[in-house]
Amino acid sequence: MAETTFGHEGGIAAPSQPVSVPGVHGESPAAHHTSTGLSNEKIAMWAFLGSECLLFGGLISTYLLYRNRSVEGPTPSEIFDIPFTSVSSFVLLMSSLTMVLAVSSIQRGDHQRCRTWLITTASLGASFIAGQVYEFTSFVREGLGYTTNIFGSAFYTLTGFHGVHVSLGILMLLSLVILSLRGRLPTERAETVEIVGLYWHFVDVVWIVIFTVVYLIPE
Amino acid sequence: MSELATHDEHGEHGHADDAAHHPTDTKYIQIALILGAITAAEVATYFVDFGPLMVPSLMVMMVVKFAMVAMFFMHLRFDSPLFRRVFVAGLITAVAVYIAALTMFEFWTEDDNIDTSTGGGETVGMVHVSR
Amino acid sequence: MALTEERIELTTGDGAVTREPLGVFKRPTAEYGWKSWLTSVDHKKIGIMYGAAALLFFALGGLEALAIRMQLAHPDGTFISHETYNQLFTMHGTTMIFLVVMPLAAAFANYLIPLQVGARDVAFPRINAFGFWCFLFGGLFLYASFFLGGAPNNGWFNYAPNSLQEFSEGHGIDFWAIGLIITGIASTTSAVNLIVTVINMRAPGMTLMRMPIFTWMALVTQFLLLFALPVITVALFLLMFNRLFDANFFEVDQGADPLLWQHLFWIFGHPEVYILILPAFGIVSEIIPTFARKPLFGYPFMVFSGIAIGFMGWGVWVHHMFASGVGPVSVAAFSLSTMFIAVPTGVKIFNWLGTLWGGNLRFTTPMLFAIGLVGMFTIGGLSGVTHAIAPHDAQQTDTYYIVAHFHYVLFGGAMFGLFGGFYFWWPKVFGRVLNEGIGKLHFWLMLIGFNLTFGPMHILGLQGMPRRTARYAEDMGWDFWNLASTVGAFIIAASFLVFWWNVIVSRKNRIADPDPWDARSLEWMTDSPPAVHNFDEIPTVTHLDEYFHRKYVEDENGRLVPVGSSVEVHEQQHAEAVEHHAAEHMHMPSPSYWPIVMALGLPIIGFGLIYNLWMCALGGLLLIAAFYGWGLEPSVDPDAPPHDSGPGADHPDGDGDEGAEAEPDSETEVAPVG
């Protein structure tokens, strides 16, 4: 048939031969009918993550600009609880490990383990969110509301956007678990888990930046 | 599924070098431990006075953690360069543009505790500059 | 398979599939009729819808312009109030940029890219449909403001703090902010889709440097969209939170900096203008070689200058802020960078001239519009260079001189290019050719009207007439040129009516030749209009301008020798496809109503943000339900009859299991597995 794949592109290395073994890299068999030998969905996710850098960059820059300019109300150093936030940051960081273990499991065909790791990841993510909720409610009690001052608006908006991203990630992780339980996530579809994993790691990586830049670096 | 017999032929279809390029679970755990250690060092800056080294070391640690998660957990190191290019394009654009913008706000040369009193500072052009 | 209880045993291919449809919500199958448009995931239908909606908004934006010109035709105008005037110029700008030029470019990109790269559709057809409906609903949401207390009235760039509630009462600005967030989602998803399509779905042999130039320019545009839209999204959210939830982002007495809005807006805003012009540059780069009967001069330079514009476009945004008090260092730096960015565009102008030079020129209507772009954009570019000189911009800024500049590049540039594209590709899209005589009348009327409207604005600007001002006094000396400009505006309107007259009258001009212009790229190798599956068989590409090389070869003297007419090439393609039983390997994505349902959730959330937060919950639930419905639905309906309009499809139900074995999660064309 005439629809063979040309993998070679100027400057873009193609796989040496089409990957016909699902589970080695978790690529779906469809991946080797594309110009680059890579899957559409994975390229799409990376492109999307590239654009998210500009979204979070804007929110982080706004925060940085405004964190010292409040005319009233609590300031960062007055309100932050670094030890507490360190723990929830560590929790989120470890969730990246469990995520990658989930991907590794399904690539090996171990669906039970994959589900376990996915649930663990979702739970760690949920703990992170719970920590955020606790943190925010205590801040509010201590006098930092969304509208109190410019630091508050910027802080809650930045962390709020991040929290929404985490929450959507948790939903996706749980959806994967349910799909898997219903037999709709076979080893050939391991890449789906990998792609959700990319999103999850990105959300973690954004927090790595936020933790340093918002919490640890003093005004 | 296609004609493969079992799932266990990891690396056995002419991709002999795959195993070396694809981290094992043990490797992932090691990386996570390193990340944890760096996080501990970051948190240490809260308790220990690093002096003028504080901000630079925090930035370095942040970048190292970012890179490790991206390269290993997100597999950028082992995957096609295309993914790296697309992502890094966005990342570099963001960093360049926002650093330029913050520069124009004189962010890097701001004093600490800018203008916490109401009505302080003066207006230059349309910009409220705090003193 | 929407809302079904699916229990698919995905074992080793002998799929025992059970499915119990819930009756009412069966998957749509319509291929004709209005329902087929609502549920279509075909990039061609989606492209046509983008074009039609954009032309509707062009009429609305044009009416707004005419009202503005009526008000300014005479000094001390009383045609409309100041408040109405403010709403009209705001909506005119917002409409023309976000609801006309961007979707027109999307129309061409969506329609042409798969055809030009030799694919059957884009990478994610349902996301493509979702994007269109987001755009339409976002635009309608914005226009709802006229009926719900007043349209936004603070200019299309809507500077803070004037955009805050205390200075802009009512909900007009909220409709603007939320409407643009929604249309931004459309453009972002579209960008991801088209980037993946171009990178990953090219025909065998089509390297990046063998792609048609329009596809290249559209690709650069998609990257610009991908990276620029998040920045304005941040700004819009900050504004919305400030207005609706009392955040402090732009409250100066709380310590906010008004320049934050300006920077965020223009970091988006400058790449945005390249988003607006690059597709038109691509269109013109296709038209001129065709009607000069010469290959594009300096194709690699055209590609790299487009990429250069994409990069450099990020480094000039402060030239929109020279008078805002950013200080002399910033002004000097950005003045320099702005002068530099003229260079890659200059390269393009010279390459177009080089293509024309020595060519066997045919002055068809598309060619006239293309040459029109080259001329008019050059004029607009020259005034742009004068703006780059910051001290001179200090006089020009906020005057009609700037209005003249951007209309020359946006109307004389982008719109002329886009109209050229309409005339050029109309035969391919609709199987009818637009009337040449009426087309030329359209062109000349539009050219004259356009120059009469905007040419004098250079003079008015240098005479000091400020922008965004509803009335001017009698003794300013601006009367004559304002009246001339208004006359010109009505001539433009007349020319637009001529275009519609052409569309109506040409409905009977059916053509049999799939390639009436003797063109160069792959889309001309398909039927007119193309079949749903685009190509009977995906071609193998060996040249830039692949289609042209199937019609002509060069002899030893370098002269072109025809080896096949367009009809012959077409028939040979068809015959080969039948021989190769190409239809058996064709899995076209099936229609779906989830995209439009999901898109509907967004304006509902929008209304909820403005009026009642419970509506947000409703819209959010709809969004999430649609997301899951969509996610659980395979892209190819396993119950759909096999695609039988392809060649060589002489096995009606024979092998029978095309659908069941298809990979449901990948929307690329898939060969049967295993």
Image (cartoon, coloured by chain):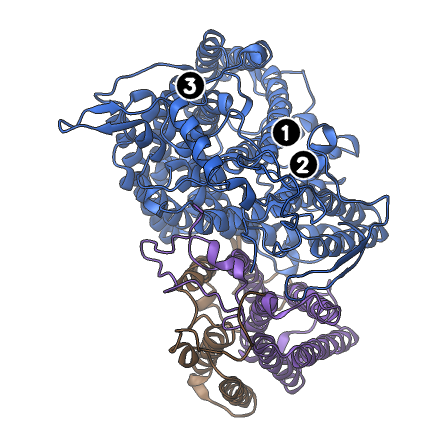
Chain colours: A purple, B brown, C blue
User: Where residue A207 sits: x, y (%)?
Assistant: 58, 73
**Is A153 situated above or below C28?**
below
Mark 3 — on which chain does it sit? C
Label 3 SS: loop
Residue marked by disc 3: C516
Q: Earlier in the sequence, mark 1 or mark 3?
A: 1
Q: Which residue is mark 2?
A: C136
For label 2, the SS is: helix
Judging by the rendered image, the residue that carries numbered circle 1 is: C53
Q: Residue at x 44, y 44 (%)?
A: C219
Q: Inspect the image, locate mark 2, and give the three-letter code of the amino acid beneath it.
A: Leu
Q: Are marks 1 and 3 in contact (CB under 8 Å)?
A: no
Q: Quadrant of residue C381?
A: top left
**Residue A169 appears anywhere in the view:** yes
Pick the residue in front: B26 or C321: B26
Q: Is residue B125 above or below residue C373?
A: below
Q: Name the residue rendered at 53%, 17% in the picture.
A: C432
Q: Nearer the viewer, residue C126 or A199?
A: C126
Q: Nearer the viewer, residue C513 or C329?
A: C513
**Type of amino acid at the residue the image marks with label 1:** Ala
Using residue A175 as the reference point, say whether residue C410 is left or right of it.
Answer: left
C82 or C144: nearer the viewer: C144
The mark nearer the N terminus, 3 or 2, is: 2
Instruction: Pinpoint residue A105: horizontal percent, then vertical percent.
Output: 60, 79
From the viewer's perspective, tell me whether residue A77 is left or right of residue C271.
Answer: right
Label 2 near label 1: C-beta < 8 Å? yes
Quadrant for the C terminus of chain A, please: bottom right
Between tags 1 and 3, which lies in front? 3
To which quarter of the image does residue C217 belong? Answer: top left
